Image: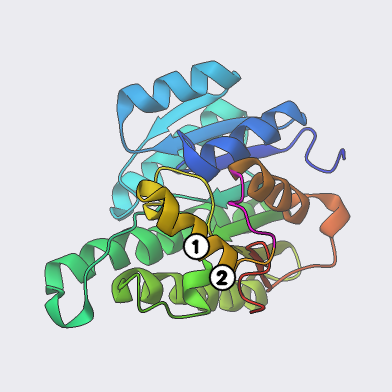
Amino acid sequence: MSGVEGRRALVTGGAGGIGGATAALLRRRGADVAILDLDVETTLRAADALGGHPVTADVREPAAVEDAVEEAARALGGPPDLLVNAAGIYRIRPAIDLEPAEWDEVLETNLRGSWLVARAFARRLVAAELPGTIVNLSSTAALVADRAEPAVHYNASKAGVIALTKQLAVELAPNIRVNAVCPGFIDTSMLRMMDDPEAGRRILDETVPLRRLGRPEEVAELIAFLSSDEAGYVTGVAVPIDGGGTVV
């Protein structure tokens, strides 16, 4: 696949997990990559490991996001034309026990942050009349509820990301394509299920037809495809990548 070669990529949450796997894959396929994450040292190490550019910012803060995207543009030699919004947090709390501050933390990071970065990214491309792509990280939690994992704030934030994706897709067409991916059980640090291996095995057997965890690299492949020229007629979709978990 050559559809991302020569692209100027910005990956939020790119210091680890799905974002890290995506940044590494895009770099291997010939894109110039800027990693945006919150922790300075972690971001520096991740960028150095793949030969990318480190940018640090809190995605919840509008001014910080604008500065970070501008910094990425300088490092990349032009405005980013490929955005992956992978920055996010996961919290568990029953809905009736949830405090407003906990709700705000998750919604501001996952939904507001995705919008702020997409806005800063798109503004520069529209002003320069350049094409580009955005892939937002949603979740199968936006599609199905799970009594065993009470996370109404997380689920609501990821459902919002799908709505954000669809609206941006129609507003930014035809020059900027916008899609989302919805990972299921992926083997990252955000997944707590495997703290109990036996319970985790039962959950996989009962709810995931492929009966295994997904790998961050598999999600990265889907993101790279949606970002590529080969997906040039795809916009406004939210694609589950979950081993069939939303089928059953």
Quadrant hosting residue 26: top right
- In the shown orientation, is residue 38 left or right of residue 100? right
Report the residue at 59% width, 37% height from top: 21
Residue sitting at x 65%, y 41%:
217
Measured along the vertical axis of the image, is residue 229 above or below residue 73? below
Mark 1, Cα crowd under 10 Å, few <14 / some 14-19 / many 20+, is few
**Residue 130 visible to an observer of this rendering:** no
Q: Looking at the image, which is closer to me, 149 or 190? A: 149
Q: How far from the left and from the top, in percent, is residue 42?
A: 36, 26
Q: Is residue 198 above or below residue 19?
A: below
Q: Which residues are magenta?
A: 210-215
Is 145 part of what is drawn in magenta? no
- The quadrant of the rendering that contains the N terminus is top right
The spot of residue 238 in percent (x, y) is: 64, 71
Q: Is residue 34 left or right of residue 130?
A: left
Task: Work out which quarter of the rendered image holds the C terminus and state it.
Answer: bottom right
Q: Determine the secondary structure under disc 2.
A: helix
Residue wearing tag 1 = 202
Q: Badge 2: few (under 14), some or many (20 or more) residues near its Cα, within 10 Å?
A: few
Q: Secondary structure at mark 1?
A: helix
Examine the rendering and report whether any part of residue 209 can be seen: yes
Compare residues 117 and 155 and report the one nearer the observer: 155
Q: Name the kind of residue labelled 2 in the image.
A: Glu
Q: Residue at x 38, y 58 (%)?
A: 113
Q: Position of residue 98 (x, y in %)?
A: 16, 74
* Circles 1 and 2: CB atoms closer than 8 Å: yes
Q: Nearer the viewer, residue 229 or 186?
A: 186
Residue identified by numbered label 2 = 206
Against 177, is 142 above or below?
below
Q: 62 or 29, which is in the foreground?
A: 29
The amino acid pointed to by label 1 is Arg
Residue at (64, 50) in percent of width and height = 219
